[in-house]
Image: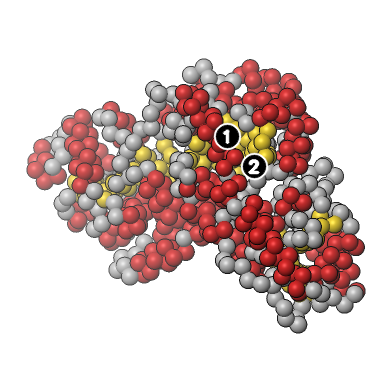
């Protein structure tokens, strides 16, 4: 069964449960594809997310998305009636046409990759998009609803009921939330199932007992700085503990819109030396903090819109780390924390009771150790991901046979071992990449063409539009930076390699192309690419780095007036098996196996080019023969790789 996951935004720092679930599915043999409508908002990436084998596909730039919409319309698959119905029923604020446009790209992506079924986390924008994607393709979907998404973010219970009715099944993360969903969607009660979030214990170091020193007790809290996390009540509880001379330090990890007001509250209560707002941290640092703290606290509440924590993953992470938990009786928290067994629970918004619970544990190290040990045992017995993912797997497998028939057999995935690197597109001036890719297509050469930087903010010409739908666009700078930061060891090796070069690319150009290479590295491996062709001097820098990292073969086209020095280009071409050079002096200096590319030169065509043929080995006097011989060269380099 070929599964896809569709997210509104991926990855999100607080949603580690998504990574854990997908990694568990891959471990069970499910091939996955991940689609993200929007890029990440942070460059911080959890280390275990790097183990995910699934390719991550981001929606292309806006002008390209509009081309996918045009294609779907031309194929009579645009859900005009559904869009009109949603505008009428739910108002234009639900942005039905925008959701459909977003769906158009992923509809083609999922069809091309023969996806049998796709799953959506959160019953919000991505789940709404799923309705249009299904209408365009017939591919069935399912949803995991979490809490704030269906209680507040979606903003319409009628739309929620429509999503549930269209989904094959709906997963919720607690029995508490299952009750809420059944209340809202009674007609879909039979397809709503509880699937707990699980913990991968391999991500956690062996638990250590809580500290029993005479120093201050270390209290830790983690979460987005939003109302329903209840941080204001935790801060008030800390103020009350100080008045009772409890020795403690409290650290709050996370960021969000309330940071300013929470810091002001800390200042007003004169807690600056006791309570610290640390900001967001990566998962490895968060887990290290959990290992060193004595108590984990989360004062969850319900905000004015009715949103709340349902089943905070961070509580399970604290229990897995053998830390006692102080929290509230909100929503599904009691399904994780057993009061007076793995921690202490109090009613929400009761800062006095919360303070008393914290003080009890601060003053009793033996109780902290007992609750922490019991919490770890509870996770091992009930919340291992190997166990929690089984109900989801059973639901997927139940849909498998029916879903497999929906994929379009007429559109199999088109494999390619050749990648074209396009530094910027569209870009004026010869050589025309549009012409080149069209000529290769005529000769049945499958090329995966990657655009590093999209520059088409204006209208695309009629000739560019068909090509645009064949190009793959790198994600935005934040996603690229996240990949860069997650591969520091490799980055340092690339920088050291540059330092040892005799002819170095300018540092700004190197850092830009190295970032492209880092993110392309995984994309090329996932597609089985064995040969890379750099279509410009700038792209050559990226191509050389990819060759060094992956051991693939490399060729290049160098334009007539390259923006970098001949020495740097010549140094890069040492790593290439061949290519075309539109600068005659540069071609003469590097020699064979590079050919002089007259079609890319700015000079007037010569009437007597026959004498060049023995030297350049490509007859430039006949265009068709030129492209055929270029195709043959590419095929030869690919077979050698």
- Label 2 or label 1, whichever comes before in sequence order: 2
Figure check: 136 above or below 336 = above
Where residue 31 appears, x then y in whole percent? Answer: 45, 40
The residue lying at 84 percent from left, 70 percent from top is 359
- The kind of secondary structure element at disc 1 is helix
Figure check: 291 above or below 399 = below
* Cβ–Cβ under 8 Å for marks 2 and 1: yes
Q: Nearer the viewer, residue 610 or 449?
A: 449
- The kind of secondary structure element at disc 2 is loop
Q: Is residue 494 visible?
A: yes
The picture quadrant where one finds residue 417 is top left
Where residue 637 appears, x then y in whole percent? Answer: 22, 45
Q: Which residue is labeled 1 in the image?
A: 395
Q: Which residue is labeled 2 in the image?
A: 195
Where residue 333 appears, x then y in whole percent? Answer: 76, 51
* CA distance for labels 2 and 1: 10 Å
Q: Nearer the viewer, residue 326 or 275?
A: 326
The residue lying at 53 percent from left, 46 percent from top is 22
How dense is the environment of label 2, judged by Cα within 10 Å: few (below 14), some, or many (20 and up)? many
Badge count: 2
Horizontal placement of 458 versus 96: left or right? left
């Amino acid at each position: 069964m070929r599964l896809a996951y569709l997210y509104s935004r991926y990855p999100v720092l607080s949603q580690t449960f998504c990574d854990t679930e997908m990694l568990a599915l891959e471990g069970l043999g499910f091939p996955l594809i991940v689609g993200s409508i929007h890029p990440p908002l942070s460059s911080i990436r959890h280390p275990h997310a790097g183990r995910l084998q699934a390719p991550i596909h981001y929606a292309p730039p806006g002008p390209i998305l509009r081309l996918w919409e045009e294609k779907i319309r031309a194929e009579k698959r645009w859900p005009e009636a559904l869009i009109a119905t949603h505008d009428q029923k739910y108002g234009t604020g639900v942005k039905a046409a925008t959701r459909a446009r977003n769906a158009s790209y992923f509809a083609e992506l999922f069809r091309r990759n023969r996806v049998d079924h796709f799953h959506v986390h959160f019953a919000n924008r991505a789940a709404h998009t799923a309705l249009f994607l299904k209408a365009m393709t017939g591919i069935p979907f399912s949803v995991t609803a979490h809490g704030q998404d269906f209680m507040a973010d979606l903003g319409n219970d009628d739309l929620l009921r429509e999503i549930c009715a269209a989904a094959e099944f709906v997963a919720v993360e607690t029995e508490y939330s299952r009750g809420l969903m059944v209340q809202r969607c009674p007609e879909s009660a039979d397809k709503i199932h509880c699937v707990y979030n699980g913990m991968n214990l391999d991500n956690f170091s062996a638990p250590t007992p809580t500290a029993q020193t005479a120093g201050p007790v270390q209290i830790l809290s983690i979460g987005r700085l939003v109302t329903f996390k209840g941080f204001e009540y935790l801060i008030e509880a800390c103020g009350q503990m100080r008045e009772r001379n409890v020795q403690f330090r409290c650290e709050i990890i996370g960021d969000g819109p309330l940071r300013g007001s929470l810091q002001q509250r800390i200042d007003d209560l004169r807690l600056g030396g006791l309570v610290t707002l640390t900001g967001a941290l990566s998962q490895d640092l968060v887990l290290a903090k959990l290992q060193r703290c004595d108590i984990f606290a989360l004062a969850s509440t319900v905000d004015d819109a009715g949103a709340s924590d349902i089943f905070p993953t961070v509580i399970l992470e604290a229990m897995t780390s053998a830390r006692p938990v102080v929290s509230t009786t909100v929503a599904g928290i009691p399904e994780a924390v057993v009061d007076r067994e793995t921690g202490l629970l109090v009613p929400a918004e009761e800062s006095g009771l919360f303070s008393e619970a914290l003080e009890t544990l601060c003053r009793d190290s033996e109780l902290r150790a007992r609750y922490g040990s019991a919490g770890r045992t509870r996770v091992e017995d009930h919340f291992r991901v190997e166990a929690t993912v089984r109900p989801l797997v059973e639901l997927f497998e139940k849909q498998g046979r029916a879903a497999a028939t929906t994929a379009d057999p007429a559109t199999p995935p088109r494999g390619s071992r050749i990648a074209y690197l396009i530094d910027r597109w569209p870009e004026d001036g010869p050589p025309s990449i549009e012409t080149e890719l069209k000529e290769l297509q005529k000769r049945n050469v499958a090329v995966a063409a990657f655009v590093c930087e999209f520059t088409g903010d204006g209208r695309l010409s009629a000739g560019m539009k068909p090509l645009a739908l064949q190009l793959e666009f790198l994600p935005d700078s934040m996603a690229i930076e996240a990949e860069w930061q997650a591969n520091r060891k490799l980055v340092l090796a690339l920088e050291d390699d540059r330092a040892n070069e005799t002819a170095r690319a300018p540092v700004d150009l190197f850092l830009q192309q190295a970032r492209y290479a880092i993110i392309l590295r995984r994309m090329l491996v996932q597609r089985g690419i064995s040969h890379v062709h750099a279509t410009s001097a700038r792209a050559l820098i990226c191509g050389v780095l990819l060759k060094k990292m992956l051991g693939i073969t490399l060729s290049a086209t160098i334009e007539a007036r390259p923006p970098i020095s001949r020495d740097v280009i010549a140094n890069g071409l040492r790593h290439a098996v061949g290519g075309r050079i539109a600068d005659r002096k540069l071609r003469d200096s590097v020699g064979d196996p590079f050919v002089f590319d007259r079609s890319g030169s700015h000079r007037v065509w010569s009437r007597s080019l026959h004498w060049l043929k023995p030297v350049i080995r490509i007859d430039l006097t006949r265009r068709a023969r030129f492209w055929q011989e270029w195709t043959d060269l590419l095929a030869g380099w690919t077979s050698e790789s």
